[in-house]
Image (tube, rainbow, N blue to C red):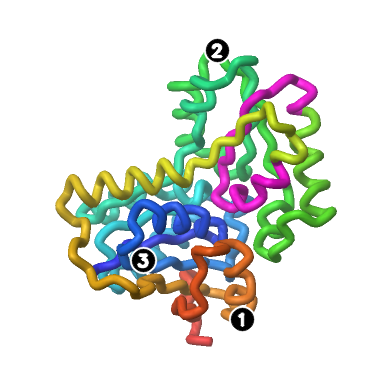
């Protein structure tokens, strides 16, 4: 019953957890939201790396057998470092979906929505170099969007204004594909589609990450079998207040949410705070 460990700066990685539940419905999962430090995007890369290392250590104390870095910023800042520090641990990280976007675009113009740290990281540069040749990538950091999603504002005027400011110049350049380079952003896909229109494809990387997790577990002989049905095996932890997270879960997870999910406060990575 060793769980899959998953973490993000906040609730964004729940979009990955939702996909994990679809392909691995019986797997126990521990999800840690570092809401005491959200958002990670504007923070220095070294700070995000330190947070990610401490969170990984915590998840390993919970006997995690694989860790999903369900955060594009943390993947850009820390994934290589984590694999070096924890060589015996399997990691799955987030990678901006430039490759499928480049393969699917007809206009040759692709919009990428991501945090500043993701755009500045070597991982994004590598993906662009390998798969983005011949495609024009139009980028936006969507300032404030993560905070709106953390507050549960998925379709209000503030969120619409942020997305309109990002997408309107891209649409004027005839983009036909949008890459979501932050795990928070899948929660506003309905609003993105209303702004961009039905002819613009939106690529959510969460299902691909879930499938890669399943492949790793199966190939390494780590997938659990013959588990008793009917139990929710999801533990949600936050380094911030518990009550706002519990209130937000039904809206973010919909039918995937169960009121008896375990939601608790945990120490934060920076110095390990006292239990709330």
Q: Is residue 17 left or right of residue 244?
A: left
Residue 227, image x, y percentages: 22, 68
Indicate the secondary structure of the residue bearing disc 1: helix
**Which residue is the site of mark 1?**
243
Q: Residue at x 45, y 61 (%)?
A: 7
Question: Residue farthest to the left?
Answer: 221
Residue 29's disc number:
3
Does any portion of residue 151 appear in the rendered image? Answer: yes
Q: Which residues are magenta?
A: 170-192
**Foreground residue, 161 or 18?**
18
Look at the image and tell me in which quarter the N terminus lies. bottom left
Helix, strand or loop at mark 2: loop
Where residue 70 appears, as percent x and y from the top left, is 46, 53
Q: Is residue 183 magenta?
A: yes
Q: Is residue 84 left or right of residue 72?
A: left
Residue positioned 76% across, 54% down in the render:
155
Residue in the picture at 56% in, 41% down: 181
Going from N to C along the chain, the mark reached first, 1 or 2, is 2
């Amino acid at each position: 019953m060793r769980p899959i460990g998953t973490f993000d700066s906040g609730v964004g990685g729940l979009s990955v957890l939702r996909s994990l539940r679809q392909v691995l419905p019986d797997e126990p999962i521990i999800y840690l939201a570092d809401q005491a430090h959200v958002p990670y995007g504007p923070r220095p890369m070294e700070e995000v790396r330190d947070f990610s290392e401490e969170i990984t250590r915590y998840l390993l104390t919970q006997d995690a057998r694989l860790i999903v870095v369900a955060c594009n910023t943390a993947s850009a800042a820390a994934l290589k470092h984590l694999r070096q520090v924890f060589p015996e641990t399997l990691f799955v990280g987030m990678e901006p979906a430039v490759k499928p976007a480049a393969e699917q675009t007809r206009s040759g113009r692709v919009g990428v929505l991501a945090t500043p740290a993701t755009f500045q990281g070597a991982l994004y540069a590598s993906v662009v170099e390998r798969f983005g040749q011949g495609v024009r990538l139009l980028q936006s950091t969507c300032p404030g969007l993560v905070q709106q999603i953390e507050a549960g504002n998925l379709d209000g005027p503030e969120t619409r204004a942020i997305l309109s400011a990002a997408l309107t110049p891209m649409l004027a350049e005839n983009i036909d594909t949008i890459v979501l380079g932050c795990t928070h952003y899948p929660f506003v896909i309905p609003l993105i589609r209303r702004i961009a229109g039905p002819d613009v494809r939106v690529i959510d990387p969460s299902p691909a990450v879930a499938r890669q997790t399943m492949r790793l577990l199966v190939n390494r002989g780590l997938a659990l079998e013959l588990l008793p049905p009917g139990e929710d095996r999801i533990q949600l932890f936050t380094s911030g207040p518990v009550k706002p997270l519990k209130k937000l879960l039904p809206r973010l997870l919909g039918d995937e949410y169960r009121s008896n999910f375990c939601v608790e406060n945990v120490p934060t990575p920076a110095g390990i705070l006292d239990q709330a």
